[in-house]
Image (cartoon, rainbow, N blue to C red):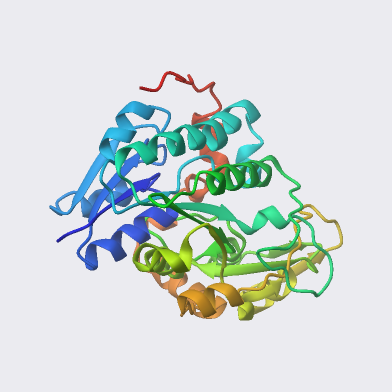
Amino acid sequence: MRHKISLLGGAGYIGTVLTDILLKKNYEVVCIDSLKFGKNAISKFLKNKKYKFFKLDTYNFNKVIKLIKNSKAVVDLSGIVGDPACSINEKNTYLSNYLNTIKIIDNLKKKDVERYIYISSCSVYGSSKGKKLIKENSKVKPISLYADLKIKCEKYILKKSSNKFTPVILRLATVFGYSPRQRFDLVINLFTLFEYLKRKIQVFGGDQYRPNVHVYDVGVAIVKCIESENSLIKKQIFNVGSNKLNHKIKDLAKLIGKKTKIEIKKTLTDERDYHIDFTKIKKKLKFKPIFTVQSGSKHLINKIKREKSLRKNFKRYSNLKVESKKYAKQIKYNSKIK
């Protein structure tokens, strides 16, 4: 029997990589996305009979709920992504990243959806100074609207858990690497781009710790949550990454910038600073990332060399740029749910 997996926001940076993994494992994939970044990233999937795409905003709750009915799992990748992009229009962010999520949750249980995988972020830990590793049960210290709404959603989701509804929360490290829907506004990807262009890499502060995980490995972690027994994942929060990939920002620049100049400035523009413990997902789900910073950066440079589209208009591969240009409008929130 072929199982149905529904992806909310499935045409994005993580969703397109996850789709490829799921289709190769013979899952049926239902992708719901507004295509704010265009459809090129999913074009290769459209002829696959196991793939169904629906252009739809997730705030069209009634339509979304009908489409994801009877899914083995729903993976929620929807919403505005990243601290800077979420600050453009805070009202939009609140509607998209919080109210939409709780309305979907409230209705999933009525539609025979057993498993719900919510994609959160290690940004919830904010600025946690010191060398002590932060675990899933450590105190959260959000310093942005993006992180604050992630925490609010997490709390709501865990309250809704039941014998027939199994939610799991994944707090991702900073993601990097190549995707069909590429992003160059992520620290390793940006440094890699500058290395390719032989442009100076500027580091502000530099002593901040940032955990990292390759986008392919994120896809693998999500699949593990789809396929694991309920007893392993029900009401669980997992940090997703590897202890070996905790790096200071200045060290990331040194690992990547071999052919370009690195300039370290004392001015701190990003206060996020967290050193994360990923032991739980390693032990419980046997999750072990395969990409290092160096191998992921090298793979991305090879893709830039091969794909002409990646070498044109780099700004379009930034969530902040796209949200600023096209989507700083008020979302019409439909609160009437049947």
Q: How many marks?
A: 0
* Residue at image point 40% right, 60% down: 179
* Residue 123, x across and y down, in percent: 67, 55
Compared across the picture, whether 95 is left or right of 90 comes to: left
236 w.r.t. 154: above or below: below
Closer to the camera, 48 or 120?
120
Q: Quadrant of the C terminus?
A: top left
Closer to the camera, 320 or 213?
213
325 w.r.t. 167: above or below: above
Q: Quadrant of the N terminus?
A: bottom left
Compared across the picture, whether 208 is left or right of 229 comes to: right
Closer to the camera, 189 or 263?
189
* Residue 48, x across and y down, in percent: 15, 54
Can residue 277 be seen from the camera position used here?
Answer: yes
247 w.r.t. 49: above or below: below
* Residue 178, x across and y down, in percent: 43, 64
* Residue at image point 38% right, 68% down: 229
Closer to the camera, 244 or 323?
244
